Amino acid sequence: MQVRKGWLWAIAAVIILGAAVRATALTDGYWIDEVISIETARLPFHDLMQRVGFLDVHPPLYYLALSAFSFVSGGGEIYVRLLSLALGLASIVLMAAWAWRRGPWVAFATVMMVAFSTFHVHYSLEARPYALLVALSAGLLYLYDRFEAEDQPGRVLLVMLLVTEASLIMTHYCGAVLVLALNAHFYTVRRHDPLKLVRWSIAQAACIAVFGLWLPFLLVQYLHLPSDTFKHLGHDGTLGRIILAFGPAPVHPSTFAAWAGAIALLSAALAGVVRGFAAGLAATTSNNAAVSVPHRRSLAAATLVAAAVALIACVCTPLITVWGIEVSEATLPLVLDVLPPAFGIIGAAVALVVAATWWNLAAVRRGHRIDGPAFALPLVAAGLAALYFFGKGLQARNAIVALPLVLGLAASSIVPRKLTAVIAMVALVLGLNLPSLANHHAAFEPRQDFRGVARFIRGNASDAPSGVANFVLPMWDRPGVEFYLGPGTANGVMSPSQLPPREILPDKVFVVLTREAMEESKAYVSAISAVLGKSYRLVRSVPFRMAVVVEFQRSPNGE
């Protein structure tokens, strides 16, 4: 008992240190995607749903949660980040609770790796849905572990699992990859007690019904958004960048240390998968065949009634969306166009749940004993790989749904025998993570310092009697600058050639370079200077975090 208490104190200490690491970035200004989140969350409910459904590529739950949290807290910058911080810490606690079922050391090692993970730290502070995605993924794994282990799980546990599962899918579409993987495990792992099996299947049908509310918008996003609307998102680098993201030090000063850490951690997770499969297949017995199926006719009738009710409910939910959300003359044809495929997808999903239920009762005898995480991780990895190679692109941030599985399995594969080995591992984790944490912006999203940019422009615009002109290149980041400078204070361009004629420009011109323009700032400054000609002289080029501000002043002796 004393040993377990010691591990609990150690886990609590690591969580506190993880919170301290994350708190250092609470005062960071917003970058463009966070500005979009905040502006969306400020909209009334109907406008919010329409904007997310017709102009975004995500489900709405995070925006609704941010809207509610901003209403309660006042919506200040620190408070908005506090929501993500709270969700990030909640995911660490949930991962600890899930891993604790596999032993105190596994829980401690999991918490150590996630608390100082550059990947997790970065997205524990973004005003974006990824902290919520990880928290719900960890929560679903914990609840599924409990549900799968109990012969007769209670209704409260079933409801909690349903709410978590539906919330996960309504937070990010990649959450469906984890949901499908756990369903594959549940229906194949063994022949379940009929009551438990039917309860699980009803919960899955209810989850389909909840997602059916959003399914028309998903199809609109996938089928009807212009192909170049989100062209700037695409792949955020190579597959190697995604692999490095899961490692302890994706931007370590030593490239060798970054890759060695990532390969070691993923190898440990793979070892956990192999051990789980080997142990599960070795422990497979014929005991599952002893599960009785009493009153088979009654069970069949009850299942068919439940399936019919579920199908009706699922089919009705898209119609509720059309009726409940105010659509315009321009958007109504889009929604009506996607209703037939929505009905087809819902019907196929419900039929699949019913078929899986009866297949488990009729066909699964011995089943297998493979642990849920070991079974699910290869399926999740395969789903993410399919998105990467065949979908519209997979960025590292979307793959964060697999982080709890990867870290949990890696921790279960590394079991030190002595205290010195524990100390050595802690030192190794900190030694790899801390140098990378100092530069985590470079590993993932740019998180430009638009607040600093706006302060600079505002502070140097007072000596321009004819006013100033502000340009953002590329144009995607214009709303981020305007968030701090004010609406209508900046113009977006995609190349220097799109700048207005110099004859109509004021005496002072500021150009904010971000993304690829920032990375090649010297070439862009030269191109802008050529466009402005001798009428303007370059005053200075000032770097900020992930942005460069270039200031030009009209020359009195110019053309």
Image (tube, grey):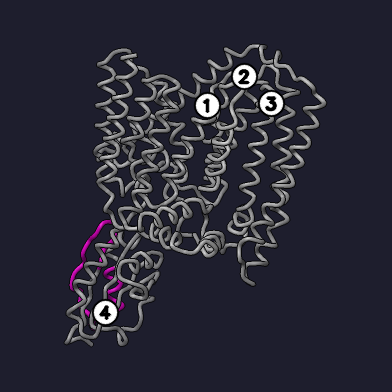
Q: Would you place residue 149 above or below residue 515 in this image?
A: above
User: In the rendered view, does 42 fall on the left or right side of 209?
Assistant: left
Cα distance, mark 3 to mark 2? Answer: 20 Å
The question of residue 187 being in magenta is answered with no
Residue 238 relative to residue 81: left or right: right
- In the picture of the structure, the residue carrying the numbered disc 1 is 145
Q: Nearer the viewer, mark 3 or mark 2?
A: 3
Mark 4 to mark 3 CA distance (whole Å)? 71 Å
Q: Which residue is mark 2?
A: 368
Question: In front: mark 1 or mark 3?
Answer: 3
Disc with the residue nearer the chain's start (1 vs 2)? 1
Callout 1, which amino acid?
A: Asp
Residue 378 seen from this side = yes
The quarter holding residue 338 reads bottom right
Disc number placed over residue 195 in the picture, else none: 3
Instruction: Indicate left or right for 463 with 64 as reference.
Output: left
Disc 1 to disc 4: CB gap under 8 Å: no
Q: Nearer the viewer, residue 101 or 451?
A: 101
Q: Secondary structure at mark 2?
A: loop
Residue at point 56%, 49% (across, down): 391
Q: Amino acid at mark 2?
A: His
**Which region shows up in magenta?**
525-549
Q: Earlier in the sequence, mark 4 or mark 2?
A: 2
Image spot of residue 187 (x, y percent): 65, 28
Identify the residue shown where x is 43% and y is 58%: 37
- Pointer 4 residue: 468
